Amino acid sequence: MYKKAAIYASSVLYFLLLAEGMSVSAEVSYNYNGRGDSVASQAGYKAVLAISGSELGCGEFNEPSDIFATDSGEFFIADKENNRIVEISSDFKSSVREYGSFSEKNGAKTTLSKPEGIFVSDDGYMYIADTGNSRIIVSDMECNIKMTITKPESAIYENETFKPTKVAADKSGNIYGVLNNVTGGAAFFDSSGEFCGYFGANSVEVSAEAAANYFKRIFATDKMRAASFRSTPTGITGFDIDNEGFFYTVTEASVSDSERVKKINAAGVNLFENLDLTFGDLHSVKTRFIDIDVDDAGRICCLDMETGRVFQYDENGSLLFIMGGRGERLGGFSVQPTAVESVGNSIYVTDGLKNTITIFEETSFGRAVHNASELYNDGLYDEALEPWQEVLRLDGNYQAAYLGMSASLLISGDYKGAMEYAELGGSSYHYNKAFERYRAKWLDENLSYVIFAAVIFVILCVIFRRYRKKRHKITEEGTEQS
């Protein structure tokens, strides 16, 4: 009774704070139930530190726009307005080096101008989106430029400018760049810097306005068509590549759920497209994802510029945790959060207005959820049962645990138990799936009894029918004699 009252009070407090426009991230944690309602929940991460450049020993940051962590643990910050890349130690306590001046192949010196993106490959090369200079540069760690990519001289590149804001490279050395004036997807270059086209483009969103414009253009003159609105796909705003080579993208504009976060294979197919997934805020707040990060365990972190929140999903797109928000307190962000990065049990978020990096650490509850989720996603369904039960013991509001229990019990053959947990989790999909298996199992185990009962029923019906006919005949004969 007291637990329910506490949960209710926390939920009321959350909505009161939300209505007042205050930051709730540091004080109140929430998730969604099976009906999509916000419910109070234990935090999977806790904000432990917001650190500035001066505290790291490199002078104040000025609009940090990107953060990247190498496999060996070093961090790199794209410090946009200071025209530099800053390397931070693996313990995130001090700066190691600044990169601002580079040597061209001919020995000439060149400097960065408003860099917005940074990526460091396993073989020790920096890929920098040097936005102010309209180029992507590839450099070794001694600031010797290996390659410079500028505006492509290609018929399929129709834009007048070249403004890269994010950059990444795959294990084959292919280079991808998010361009702030391109809606055709990420610009794709081979390992020699040759422009090959676009990758991961969003489709054109079909809206009433777009449909009306289409029919208008059918009957319009050439002059009217030139002046009319043109429907174009929304551009991606951030991307990442996981350890298996899958390409993930997010978009800031309002698009369908299947386009907001995409997991793309080498053939260009969005693996999330046909799944029943919802990304971002489930209510009236417009979601504007501006960055995405995928950690070594396959967990996906998406940074929402509209709310200042980080939404974390498992590798299958199921929501795990929500953290952050607007506000001045620890764990809150300004109107300009810019990038997110995950390393081990920590999540790092850069704030382009506060000029800080906020560090979130995994809580014991977060560790329990991650443990259960990883076991289940690895196919260890029996082993995942006990961790899911531990999650429910810690937080009875956590819907994913009910669904995890239901799915694990379904696979292990306990269909009745799977139905019970699906009902508690409010999932008709999981319940119907378990009920179908339960019904099939019951029929398989009791088919002979069903057939026997049916045969007996038919025999009894025949006997009863003959008895009634005989009784009817006797009655008729008695009536005639009288």
Image (cartoon, grey):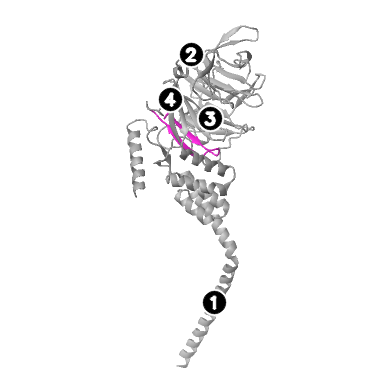
**Residue 459 on image: x %, y %:** 57, 76
Q: Is residue 312 magenta?
A: yes
Magenta span covers which residues?
A: 306-326
Image spot of residue 94 (x, y percent): 50, 20
Q: Measured from the top left, where is residue 64 in percent x and y?
A: 48, 19
Q: Residues within 10 Å of mark 4 (few under 14, many from 20)?
A: many
The mark closer to the camera, 2 or 3, is 3
Within 10 Å of disc 1 (Cα), the crowding (few <14, some 14-19, many 20+) is: few
Dot 2 or dot 4: first in sequence order is: 4
In the image, is residue 432 part of the stretch drawn in magenta?
A: no
Query: In the image, which disc is placed on residue 482?
Result: none
Disc nearer the start of the sequence (2/3): 2
Mark 3 belongs to which amino acid? Val
Near-viewer residue (389 or 126): 389
Mark-to-mark CA distance, 2 and 3: 25 Å
Residue at image mark 4: 50
**Which residue in the protein does label 3 denote?**
343
Determine if residue 415 is in view: yes
Work out whether 330 lies above or below 193: below
Measured in 3D between alpha carbons, the distance from the residue under mark 3 to the one under mark 4, in whole angstroms, is 16 Å
Badge nearest the viewer, 1 or 2: 2
* 50 left or right, relative to 237: left
Which-is-in-front pick, marks 4 and 1?
4
For this rendering, which residue is in front, 261 or 104? Answer: 104
| Amino acid at dot 2 | Asn
Quarter where residue 327 is shown: top left
Residue linked to disc 1: 460
Q: Secondary structure at mark 4?
A: strand
Of callouts 4 and 1, the N-terminal one: 4
Q: Which residue is mark 2?
A: 82
Q: Residues within 10 Å of mark 3 (few under 14, many from 20)?
A: some
